[in-house]
Image (cartoon, rainbow, N blue to C red):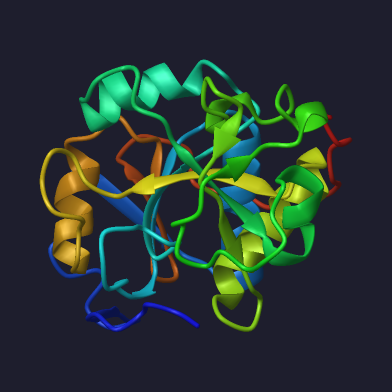
Amino acid sequence: MHAQFGPAIGDTGLDDGLTGTLQATRLDEDALVDTAARALAKGQVIAWSQGPMEYGPRALGNRSFLADPRSDGIRDVINEKIKKRELFRPFAPSVKAEAASDYFELRQPSPFMTIVVPVRPEKRDVIPAVTHVDGTARPQTVDRSVNRRYWKLLDRFEQLTGVPVLLNTSFNIQEPIVCSAADARATFERSGVDALVLGDQWVTRSGQPRPRLECADPQPVL
């Protein structure tokens, strides 16, 4: 089951319209996923824009702002500086489908982020950024067969940190969720987000370091 019925971001035309304020590096999938996962593990916030847009009110890994759920303070950063909304507003988690029951009291798939369930008590301090004040969350379970690249990002983040969960909120700032590559670039430029993953491109502001592959994996941070 999926909701990917909207217009797609492909591999053509992504360089068109890039201005002097942005720089883009095209990467193969493994390098792209690794670069994004390492940035997230370091506390950066990224915009993730891939494939067809999801139909409906939820960002499900194709038009999303993503962040490390282990950082409680990241909620205020995203609400105040990026989403520009009330600080009490909660964020939802994306989790690898096969690991969902380890973190949430969930006994069924939840691919559309529509079910509110308790976060397991022993995991609430592990993923505080996506745990609401009442101990619940609204998880999205990500199946590898449905959204392979997003699942690979979650899997790589787990390899780096021990946690198969990401904070996932819609890629927009007080307007409809971005649809096209042009929408994604424009919203990224006026956000405080660290990087944009647009199709196969790693996009940053001019002057920021280009991505480089690490020679060895860091130790998991639990």
Q: Is residue 214 visible?
A: no
From this view, report whether residue 112 is shown above or below residue 208: below
Q: Position of residue 29 (x, y in %)?
A: 59, 72
Image point 74% across, 28% down: which residue?
A: 126
Vertical order, 157 against 4 (above or below): above
- Could you tell me which residue is drawn at 26 percent across and 59 percent down? 57
Residue 117 point in image, percent of width and height:
59, 45
Camera-side residue of 21 and 53: 53
| Residue 101, horizontal then vertical, whole percent | 77, 54
Left or right for 55, reference 144: left
In the displayed structure, 16 sits above or below 178; it is below
Q: Quadrant of residue 3?
A: bottom left
Residue 42 locus on image (x, y percent): 63, 30
Quarter of the picture holding the C terminus: top right
Q: Is residue 173 left or right of residue 217?
A: left
Q: Is residue 213 visible?
A: yes
How many dots with numbers? 0
Which of these two is toward me, 51 or 56? 56
Above-or-below relation of 27 to 3: above
Answer with left or right where residue 170 lies relative to residue 115. Answer: left
Quarter of the rendering containing residue 100: bottom right
Relative depth, front residue between 150 and 134: 134
Identify which residue is drawn at 16% across, 70% down: 16
Horizontal side of residue 222 vs 193, given as left or right: right
- The residue depicted at 14 percent of the width and 50 percent of the height is 186
